[in-house]
Structure formats: structure tokens, C-alpha cells
Amino acid sequence: MTQNKITVENIRAMKARGEKIAALTAYDFPMAKLLDEAGIPMLLVGDSLGMVVLGYPDTTHVMMEEVEHHLRAAARAHPRALLGGDLPFRSYETPHSALRNAQRLVTAGAEYVKAEGGRTILAQVRAIVSAGIPICGHLGMLPQRVLEEGGYHVKGKTPSERRDLLADARALAEAGAFAIVLELVTPPVAKEITEDLSIPTIGIGSGAGCDGQILVISDLVGMFPWFTPRFVKPQANCGEQIKLAVAAWKKSLG
Ligand code: KIV
């Protein structure tokens, strides 16, 4: 057993202490191990893996088997960090399928699952929580709805969007979610939700007022240089470094 394993309770306690929660995605063994060694307390095998690892145009193509495969790899790192897995598109359409697929992710190594949506998926959230599986909500821009919404749009700009986001966040917290990702929510609304809830909010492109921040690791370290979201400031240029290393090795062959 890894020493001082981080639990859902530890993540919740970070909010209570006012300690910022740093969360990152990881899709395999070496990355989970590196991020764990760097002291990141919360990891996610996100369905973003479909875009930044598997080459799909969006996350709607990701299958349960693909998340399970990558979760098993990340879990083999036995991170101290809390390790989660995303429920992919259409894997939680009913409480029954949500629970069955959440159990599959737990079997693959997830210590929490994440699902997109608010009041429309409350029965699914309750079924997962009742089975003792921690769940993280996801509100704001929902990547699994990109085809329906025709793009990745910022949420919370209108009074009705603000009201809906607040009502969804409160409903998820009441249903037992231990944290909520807020993606592309206007910073004032993300801050308002954060102050309203007793569970942590983890922002992505939603300003500094959230309890924590999550990024796709490939964006943070420049491993997917063909597209970088505007809210990410890459801290490394791994793609360029790989090309330079390979070119140097090729040249050394003479
Ligand atoms: O799929 C993903 O990686 C995510 C996070 C970026 C929140 O949902």
C-alpha cells in the first residue's frame, strides 16, 4: 500500500484549509508516476485521452474499453495521488449503465469517476454514490456535448446560464459528488459557485477563483503542439524537445 494515500476526504479537506488543489490528467504508467513524484494530489484518466493520445477529433469517440486500458496503465504506477477515470460519452445514460460502467472503471483502478452534467444526470450520480463510488461532477462547457452544441462555448454569460450552473452545482453536491470540475465557466460565476458550495470546485479555463485547477497534461507540457487552449500557458515544450533529440540522434549516425 502506498504511504499516505490521498483520499477523497483529503481533497475535500484542502478546500476547508484554503489549500489550492492541483489536478492533472495522466493516461499511462510513466506519466502517472512522474506527476505523482511531482506531488500532484489528484490525477484523472480523462476522456481527453481520445484527442491528445488516440487522435480522435473530439471525446465523443472514446469507448469504455479505451478508458479502462489507460486506467489500468496509470494505476500500475500505484500513485499516492487520488486516481480517477472519466465515464465516456453514452456510458451513463441510465442509473443502471452508470453504475455498471463506474464499477468497471473501479475494477480498472479508478478511485473516483467523473461524469458530465448536472440535474439531468442526478439519478445516475445517486446510483454511483449509493454504491460507495466517489464521483466528481463536471459542469460548464461539456466536451461530450460538442456535437450538439456546435463548438466549445464559454458558459455563465447570461443570467439564465448562471442560474442553471448554480442549481446544477448545488444539486450535484446534494446528491453526493465530492468535487465538481468547472470547465470554461465565466470567472465571476465560477467564483460564486465555489463560494456557495462546501465541496471543492476544480476549474479549467474558469479563472483563479476555483478551489483547484485541472489541466490536460499534454497542454501543460507542450506534448500536443498542434493545438493549445487559449487559457493554458505551457510550462515546457516536450514536442519540440523530442524532435530536437531525434534529429540529434539521427545526425550522430553519420
Ligand atoms: O477529459 C478530461 O481530461 C477532462 C479534464 C480536463 C477536466 O475532463
Image (spheres, rainbow, N blue to C red):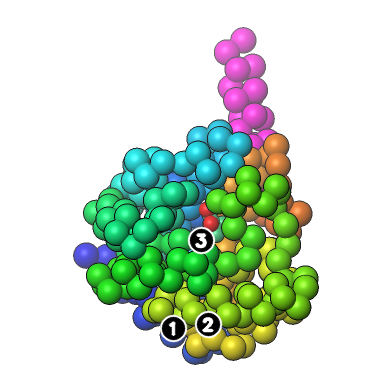
Q: Secondary structure at mark 2?
A: helix
Viewer-proximal residue, 178 or 3? 178
* Mark toward the start of the polypeptide (3 vs 1): 3
| Residue that label 2 marks | 170
Q: Amino acid at mark 1?
A: Glu
Q: Work out how far the residue at label 2 is from the one at label 1, CA to CA, in angstroms.
A: 6 Å
Q: Amino acid at mark 3?
A: Glu
Q: Is residue 99 visible?
A: yes
**Label disc, if present, on residue 84 of the rendered structure:** none
Ligand 1 within 8 angstroms of badge 3 C-beta: yes
Magenta segment boundaries in residue numbering: 236-254
| Residue that label 3 marks | 116
Is 125 drawn above or below residue 26 in the view shown?
Answer: below
Q: Quadrant location of the N terminus? A: bottom left
> Residue, x 38% and y 66% (percent of image)?
124
Q: Position of residue 229 (x, y in %)?
A: 71, 51
Q: Amino acid at mark 2?
A: Arg
Q: Work out how far the residue at label 3 is from the one at label 1, CA to CA, in angstroms.
A: 16 Å
Contact flag, marks 2 and 1 (Cβ < 8 Å): yes
> Residue, x 68% and y 63% (percent of image)?
184
Q: Quadrant location of the C terminus? A: top right
Extreme-top residue of the structure: 254
Is 247 drawn above or below residue 30 in the view shown?
Answer: above
**Label disc, if present, on residue 174 of the rendered structure:** 1
Q: Residues within 10 Å of mark 2 (few under 14, many from 20)?
A: some
